[in-house]
């Protein structure tokens, strides 16, 4: 089970596991009871004694300058305990840094660059009183011309979002070989341009912070993906030492990248709490979260792809336009074009423009699902042109390493994802079926994907074995709903043989737990589980030392299982009966994650296979079945793995078929202001069957648990696979996401005429 240090999975890491007993099993979440009964306290549920409620006044214009704010009347309204405007303390805290780290705005900035930008805030005894007071704030705006359409932002004479113009930095990109030469060498070339709408994260739990000062000590309960990230940013914003800020996030209802960083409402809550001398809760409404705490930027992507008759790719080009909204944010990704397939001649160029819209943020594999939607449709079209099966075209161009970074992969499961997926899906048979002639057309499509982030390896965990044989795990990792607590507890159970129900997890509290990077970037398990394993192994070594002495056995001959030590001869001694453990009261192990394997990249891969039915009269698309094949390395928990795949696929369906932030380009107003207009897929939209097939390459180098990331790769290829299936079913290529009925009906009509 355990092993000594070796160079296998990073310097100083323990030997990889062989067979496991607890890890990998489909175990329900250890906190399922709290979650299901509603006993779990999310930040939104938290109430502190004497707590006030805050609300934010937001600019009603897409672009305006605040000339004057009068808070005097509002401050006298019933129940109001604190007000904060653009001249108040903290209002000038720098915000939205550019690539060089220079701020482009401030916490409450007189220059408002999108509809919904923060102007002032109020804390009162009740939320109703705070909202009522906001109505009494007198603001004089100078309304300015706005641009919300990214394709118009660079036009001559377009309204300037920032004084220095609408370009967010210079065009940037990547190149290897010679794209034009590669296109010239090709026997077939395709060029297509996709457009994808802006999506909004819409986690079940809205963003919320509760701030509480005790003297100079600030505690913030925050619905966040990363308590340590928020602590660092909040301490910097308020000019406090890290030790004066505590951030807690015990239960979180999703984040998807929208809760990776500090948000303005958190600082406003802290400032209002300080002014009022009372705890303050600031919970955003659903509409506010659709405006101001991030989104997946819209993309316009032009892909050029060329290949020889045998399928060998000779050229891949990407021209990308995106917008981080009114403030700096990355908008497009060149990852797939640069690294998903072996190709000698590649060139990418990215333009990122400013528009008068809410700022972009990291969103589940930032930029990559839109890029998959473009690249994987281009691959599909190229295969068609060459008369090849799209599966064969992909198999002809498998990578073995990152060509953009010049490093081999520790494992490359892409080929197995494609081959085993095709077999399990019945790809060839389904593909060969004749196109239906009636109004309901069925088709199948596939798309591949990969993810490019290895994770921030700096994670520490602490495991304590207690005298009665139970154990605690202390980790800073946030469980954003994916089952992090459960999976990390399984690692402890695996190494110590302590039953899962006797392990308590304390997590995501900067005041009491160990450092962990944010739960994002598909890094949570692969960064934290090795640290937890190292901590458990330290406890294990101490425990076996004690047991060996008492049982007169060599430590290496003992096993730990069922809360007992078992000798080679089969003698069982419960941990609580070890005198040495009782004497020590507890055994503590501190574990750090070993660095990444030097000179290699550990990255996950995926292939999704979709079957759709398109009603060519209405443009309605029904996903009949989807198979997600994931090389995420070891499956740590078959149940949470499946859950993650379901979430990624359904979110991919939303991206592909229904979700669209709609702005009125004439006024700059947000039109999709709630779940009526911003259409998340519901249970009725999810396919009857989402199948998942893990491909485990038994990567012994990636880290000491053998797991690679899953959260993002489970989402990346979905929409592209559906698009290719729609093409197979109907013959039209849906280049615009979401592929809504009106868009498809228009495409089908054009194809008929
Ligand atoms: Mo993710 S976009 O790193 O939560």
Image (cartoon, rainbow, N blue to C red):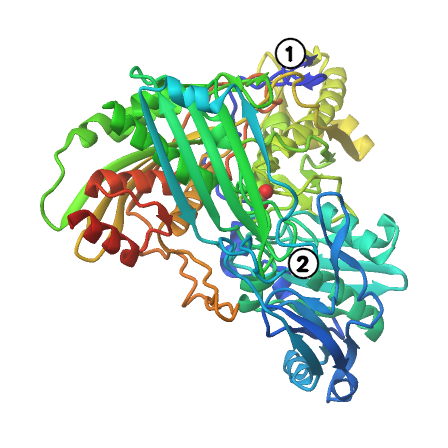
Q: Position of residue 436 (x, y in %)?
A: 12, 41
Tag 1 secondary structure = helix
Give whichever of discs 2 and 1 has the lower sequence position.
2
Q: Return the residue nearer the eye: 592 or 713.
A: 713
Q: Quadrant of ligand 1?
A: top right
Residue 568 lies in what quarter of the image? top right
Cα separation between marks 2 and 1: 69 Å
Tag 2 secondary structure = loop
Q: Position of residue 88 (x, y in %)?
A: 83, 72
Q: Return the residue nearer the eye: 524 or 678.
A: 678
Q: Is residue 227 left or right of residue 495?
A: right
Determine the residue positioned at 16% across, 50% down: 753
- Mark 2 is surrounded, within 10 Å at the Cα level, by few (under 14), some (14 to 19) or many (20 or more) other residues, namely some
Pointer 2 residue: 162
Pointer 1 residue: 557
- Mark 1 is surrounded, within 10 Å at the Cα level, by few (under 14), some (14 to 19) or many (20 or more) other residues, namely few
Res 703 label: none
Q: Is residue 204 above or below residue 399?
A: below
Q: Is residue 382 left or right of residue 600?
A: left
Determine the residue positioned at 63% across, 13% down: 8
Q: Return the residue nearer the eye: 429 or 244.
A: 429
């Amino acid at each position: 089970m355990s092993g000594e240090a070796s160079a296998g999975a990073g310097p100083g890491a323990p030997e990889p596991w062989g067979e496991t007993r607890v890890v990998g099993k489909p175990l329900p979440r250890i906190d399922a009871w709290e979650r299901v009964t509603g006993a779990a306290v999310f930040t939104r549920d938290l109430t502190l004694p004497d707590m006030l409620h805050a609300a934010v006044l937001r600019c009603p214009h897409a672009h305006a300058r605040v000339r004057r704010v009068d808070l005097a009347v509002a401050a006298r309204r019933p129940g109001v305990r604190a007000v904060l405007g653009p001249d108040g303390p903290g209002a000038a805290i720098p915000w939205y840094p550019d690539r060089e780290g220079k701020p482009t705005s401030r916490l409450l900035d007189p220059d408002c660059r999108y509809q919904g930008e923060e102007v002032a805030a109020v804390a009162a005894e009740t939320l109703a009183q705070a909202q009522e007071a906001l109505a009494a704030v007198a603001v004089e705006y100078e309304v300015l011309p706005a641009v919300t359409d990214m394709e118009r932002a660079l036009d001559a004479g377009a309204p300037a979002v920032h004084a220095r113009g609408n370009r967010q930095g210079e065009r940037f990109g990547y190149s290897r070989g010679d794209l034009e030469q590669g296109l010239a060498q090709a026997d077939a070339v395709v060029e297509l341009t996709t457009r994808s709408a802006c999506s909004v994260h819409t986690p079940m739990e809205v963003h919320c912070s509760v701030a509480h000062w005790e003297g100079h000590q600030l505690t913030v309960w925050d619905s966040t993906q990363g308590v340590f990230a928020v602590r660092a940013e909040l301490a910097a914003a308020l000019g406090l030492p890290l030790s004066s800020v505590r951030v807690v996030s015990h239960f979180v209802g999703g984040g998807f990248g929208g809760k990776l960083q500090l948000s303005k409402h958190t600082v406003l809550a802290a400032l209002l709490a300080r002014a009022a001398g009372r705890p303050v809760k600031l919970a955003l409404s659903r509409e506010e979260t659709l405006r101001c705490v991030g989104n997946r930027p819209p993309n316009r992507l032009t892909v050029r792809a060329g290949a020889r008759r045998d399928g060998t790719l000779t050229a891949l080009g990407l021209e990308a336009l995106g917008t981080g909204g009114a403030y700096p944010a990355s908008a497009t990704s060149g990852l797939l074009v640069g690294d998903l397939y072996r190709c000698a001649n590649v060139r990418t160029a990215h333009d990122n423009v400013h528009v008068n819209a809410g700022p972009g943020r990291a969103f589940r594999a930032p930029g990559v699902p839109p890029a998959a939607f473009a690249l994987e449709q281009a691959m599909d079209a190229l295969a068609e042109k060459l008369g090849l099966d799209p599966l064969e075209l992909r198999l002809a161009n498998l990578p073995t390493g990152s060509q953009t970074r010049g490093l081999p992969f520790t494992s490359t499961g892409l080929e197995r994802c494609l081959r085993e997926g095709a077999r399990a899906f019945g790809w060839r048979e389904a593909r060969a079926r004749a196109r239906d002639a009636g109004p309901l057309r069925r088709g199948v499509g596939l798309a591949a994907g990969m993810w490019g982030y290895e994770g921030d390896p700096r994670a520490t965990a602490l495991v304590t074995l207690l005298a009665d044989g139970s154990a605690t795990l202390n980790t800073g990792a946030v469980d954003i709903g994916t089952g992090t607590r459960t999976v990390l507890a399984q690692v402890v159970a695996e190494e110590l043989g302590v039953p899962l129900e006797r392990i308590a997890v304390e997590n995501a509290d900067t005041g009491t737990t160990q450092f962990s990077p944010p739960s994002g970037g598909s890094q949570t398990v692969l960064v934290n589980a090795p640290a937890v394993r190292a901590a458990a192994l330290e406890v294990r070594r101490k425990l076996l030392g004690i047991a060996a002495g008492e049982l007169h056995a060599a430590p290496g001959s003992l096993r730990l299982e069922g809360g007992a030590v078992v000798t080679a001869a089969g003698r069982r001694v419960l941990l609580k009966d070890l005198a040495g453990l009782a004497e020590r009261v507890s055994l503590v192990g501190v574990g750090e994650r070993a660095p990444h394997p030097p000179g290699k990249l550990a990255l996950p891969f995926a292939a999704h296979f979709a079957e759709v039915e398109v009603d060519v009269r209405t443009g309605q698309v029904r996903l009949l079945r989807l198979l997600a094949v994931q090389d995420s390395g070891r499956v740590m928990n078959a149940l949470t793995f499946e859950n993650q795949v379901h979430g990624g696929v359904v979110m991919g369906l939303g991206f592909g078929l229904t979700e669209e932030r709609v702005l009125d380009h004439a006024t700059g107003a947000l039109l999709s202001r709630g779940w009526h207009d911003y259409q998340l897929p519901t249970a009725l939209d999810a396919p009857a069957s989402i199948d998942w097939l893990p491909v485990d390459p038994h990567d012994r180098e990636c880290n000491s648990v053998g797991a690679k990331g899953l959260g993002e790769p489970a989402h990346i290829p979905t929409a592209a696979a559906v698009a290719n299936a729609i093409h197979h079913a109907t013959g039209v290529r849906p280049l615009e996401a979401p592929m809504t009925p009106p868009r498809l009906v228009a495409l089908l009509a054009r194809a008929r005429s």
